[in-house]
Amino acid sequence: MIKFISRISASTVVGLCLFSSAPSHAGLFEDEDARKAIVELRLELRQKIEDLKAYNVRNDADVEKIKKNMLDQANSLEGLRAEIATLRGEKDSLAKDFSDMQRKLKDVTQAFEARLAKLEPVKVSIEGREFSAEQNEKRDFENALGLFKKGDFSASSSALNDFLRRYTQTGYKLTALFWLGNSQYATKEYKDAIANFKLLLLNDPSSPRASEAMLSISNCQLDMKDTKAAKKTWEEIINTYPDSEAASAAKERLARFK
């Protein structure tokens, strides 16, 4: 222990001697290095601080940029939501318009079909004959015949004449001629009545109204005081339509006028 202490003391003494014997400018050099080191450290620290500040500035700028991007995206999202809401509204409006158009189309179609149905020919069965007639044609004939049934013979005569002029190819022709002749007979237009009854016979001698038409001709002849012509007509009825009611009536009249 004593030896260790003595060694340390000796070396220490030697060192102190060496240090004390060094030139004085060595101490100054060391102070200058220390100052430079301090300055360098300060500069480095200042640079670090500046770098940190610059980093913070860049970081703040990045943060602001991110915030701005997020805000822009949020605005874009709101814009998209508004656009989607608008599109949904337009879709609903278009759906309603389409539904309204379908309803209107259905109404127009039904109205057209109804009008078309009124224009479509209808089947008519009259006096053992079947034919197709326009709806207006059927209506006009029935209206004219209705006047006869009401006893308005002058009006029915005019209506039936007009009907035959307008519907020259009508299936009602023979029936219209028969009732026209009867209307004219009722208004004492005997010659016109006879002409229309004969026209009926000329068009269809086998018509169910043929024998009645001939009997009506004989009535016109009697009212015109042409008994000879009436007798001839009765004989023709008996010969042409022997099984008809008109033939029975003709036989009775012939017997009465002998």
Image (cartoon, rainbow, N blue to C red):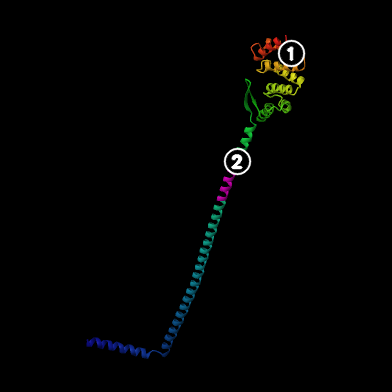
Q: Residue at x 64, y 35 (%)?
A: 115
Location of residue 134 in the rendering, given as x and y in whole percent from the top left corner: 66, 29
Q: Amino acid at mark 2?
A: Asp
Whole-number angstrom distance, CA of label 1 to CA of label 2: 62 Å
Secondary structure type for disc 1: helix
Q: Residue at x 33, y 88 (%)?
A: 15
Location of residue 46 in the rendering, given as x and y in whole percent from the top left corner: 47, 78
Check the image and name the residue furthest to the left.
1
| 96 in the magenta segment | yes
Q: Which residue is mark 2?
A: 107
CB-based contact (under 8 Å), mark 1 and mark 2: no
Location of residue 225 in the rendering, given as x and y in whole percent from the top left corner: 77, 15
Q: Which residue is mark 1?
A: 230
Looking at the image, residue 122 lies above or below residue 211 = below
Q: Earlier in the sequence, mark 1 or mark 2?
A: 2
Q: Amino acid at mark 1?
A: Ala
Q: Residue at x 49, y 74 (%)?
A: 53
User: Is residue 237 at all visible to an observer of this figure?
Assistant: no
State the extent of the magenta-drawn residues as a range: 92-109
Secondary structure type for disc 2: helix
Image quarter in which the C terminus is found = top right
User: Is residue 104 at all visible to an observer of this figure?
Assistant: yes
Front-most of 204 and 6? 204
Image side of residue 201 versus residue 65, left or right? right
Front-most of 81 and 35? 81
Q: Nearer the viewer, mark 1 or mark 2?
A: 1
